[in-house]
Each structure stands twice: as C-alpha cells, then as structure tokens.
Image (spheres, helix red, strand yellow):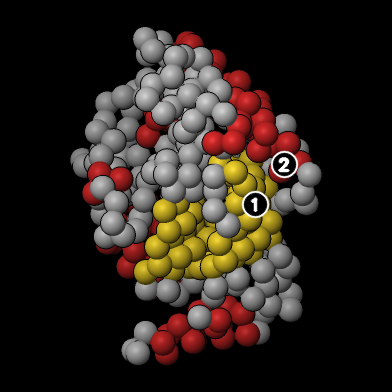
Amino acid sequence: MMRSVPLLLLSMLLFGSCNTTRRTVRFGVLTDIHYAERDPLNDRYYAQAMNKTREAIDVFRQHPLDFVVELGDLKDQSSDADKTKTLNYLNRIEQCLQNCGKPVYHVLGNHDTDCISKQEFFSQITNPSTGKDTGFYSFRTKGVKFIVLDANFNPDQSDYDSGNFDWTKALIPDHELQWLEKELKKGDEPVIVFIHQLLDAGSGLDSGLYVSNTATVQQILVRSGRVLAVFQGHHHGGHYSHKEGIHYFTMPGVITGARLDSNAYAIVEVAPDGTVTIHGYRNCPSRTLLPPSQR
C-alpha cells in the first residue's frame, strides 16, 4: 500500500494537468533482425530476415507513425567473421529500414559489434542527430521523452568491440548511469526507455539475458517517477513483466523462423493519459499497458 501514494502522485503530475496539450505518439518497433547472407543455424534464418523486415516496413508505411525503432542485433556476421561482408550486411539492412519514410532510431545490440567496433557500426547507420555516433541518447516526440540505453560494456566498463566480450555479462557503465540520472531530471514528460538487453531481472528468464547491474538501473528509473515502460529485445521468444510501477515488454525477434508467418513486429501508441497500447503483428502479442492512474 505504501507504493500507491507515490504512484497516484505520479499520475497526477504526469497526466492530470498536461494531457490536454499532449498528442498520441505512434511508433513502429522490431528487434533482433540478425540479417546476414549465411546458412540457417538452429531456428535462426539470417538471410530470410530481409524479407521479414521488408514486410514490417511495408506495414509501417501504411500508418501515420512518428518514428520507427529497432532494438538491437540489426545484423549478424558472415560465417567466417569477415568484416567487409558484415559491413555490407549492415548497409543493406539499414537501407531497408530507411525505406519506412520516417526517422529510424537504433538501439545497439551485442551482435552489432560481433566482428566490428561500435564506431564502425555507427558509420553505416543513419540515426537522427540526437543519437549520432553514440549508443545512448534521448529524444522527445509530442510530449513524451524517449531514452535509448547501451548495455554493451564489459565488467571493466570497456566497450564491446569486435567480438571481444561475453554477451552474458552486459553492463551499463558509471558514466552512462550518471547521464541517465541527469536525463530523468530534465523536464517532466512521461518516459519510455529502449534497450537491447533485459532490465527486468528476476522475471523468470535465464540470468545471462539481464544487464548485470540491472538492480541499480531499475532503482534509477523508479526514483524518477516518470518511466511508463521499457521496451527491450535480446530474448527472441519475447516476455513481459511489471515491477514497481514500470512495464517491461520484451519484443520477440524477427530472426526466428524462415516463413513470414513467424515474423514479429508492432505498432505502439502512447496516449495522452499515459496508456501504452501495443498492436502486435504475426508472433508479437498485443497488450495494453495501463498508467498508474488506471491500475
């Protein structure tokens, strides 16, 4: 019961006085495309991911979206880990995404640095200016703040770089945590967070999927009193949890399965009252995420 009071205050602050000036935000989202021209491995069909991405982009173009976001692992590497081939895969799938006709925001995933560096990845993508040449950044759309996080750091806080990392040991380093706290103190808009690896540790999945210092990150988000939801990828099967007033929605991956009917993507609406509605396509479930005032 002690948490109900701050949640009520949160609702009044975020939505009670300003929802008349806010408008519904709509964005397309997909994750874990892993595009590469290589043979399938288990349930990962790398080459087929291009057509599945095209399908998602075609659907996105039919709706009045404000932007599209991909949640990481945009591409994979060639079977022989050749850098030139891998950069070509990245360039091709990026061109496909840019056909959506809307701004495309990128979240950095662990496979995005499998045989290339972060800077080499950034050199092949087009992020709006706020996210140029960095894995963590923020932007605002129609009265909602969006924060993109980068957990692709080693335990010693060095960058994941050209495959020199253990993907089960992702970390958000101190300098990014400090930046996050400052970002959450700027303005008073409701916040949506995008990240590749999972932040809802303890929600029942394998421990290696979660950011190693997720407890610290969770508390920063909770203390801000502004975060409605976290959208994350990495776990190709998808998942959902709710912790301390924040929704955590894990998008299913595009890469799984060869056929279009195994695809997964969504259109998300953030309403002026803070309701987040996920319209899922193919294997992505639909879900309504209620704000504190409606729970």
Relative vertical location of residue 92 with respect to residue 208 in this rendering, above or below: above
Secondary-structure class at tag 2 = helix
Q: Position of residue 108 (x, y in %)?
A: 45, 38
Relative vertical location of residue 239 with respect to residue 55 in this rendering, above or below: below
Q: Nearer the viewer, residue 127 or 39?
A: 39
Q: Position of residue 124 (x, y in %)?
A: 56, 25
User: Label for residue 267?
Assistant: 1
Q: Earlier in the sequence, mark 1 or mark 2?
A: 2
The amino acid on which the numbered mark 1 sits, given as a three-letter code, is Ile
Q: Position of residue 81 (x, y in %)?
A: 37, 13
Locate residue 142 relative to residue 8 in the image: left or right.
right
Q: Examine the image and state in which quarter residue 165 appears.
A: top left
Locate residue 284 relative to residue 215 in the image: left or right.
right
Q: Residue at x 53, y 19 (%)?
A: 47
Q: Position of residue 41 (x, y in %)?
A: 38, 21
The amino acid on which the numbered mark 2 sits, given as a three-letter code, is Val
Q: Nearer the viewer, residue 221 or 27?
A: 27
Q: Residue at x 54, y 36 (%)?
A: 262
Can residue 94 be seen here? The reply is no
Crowd class of label 1 (few under 14; some 14 to 19; many from 20; radius 10 Å): many
Q: Residue at x 46, y 14 (%)?
A: 38
Q: Quadrant of the N terminus?
A: bottom left
User: Contact (CB < 8 A) between labels 1 and 2?
Assistant: yes
Question: Where is mark 2, residue-wise?
Answer: 59
Relative vertical location of residue 291 with respect to residue 115 in this rendering, above or below: below
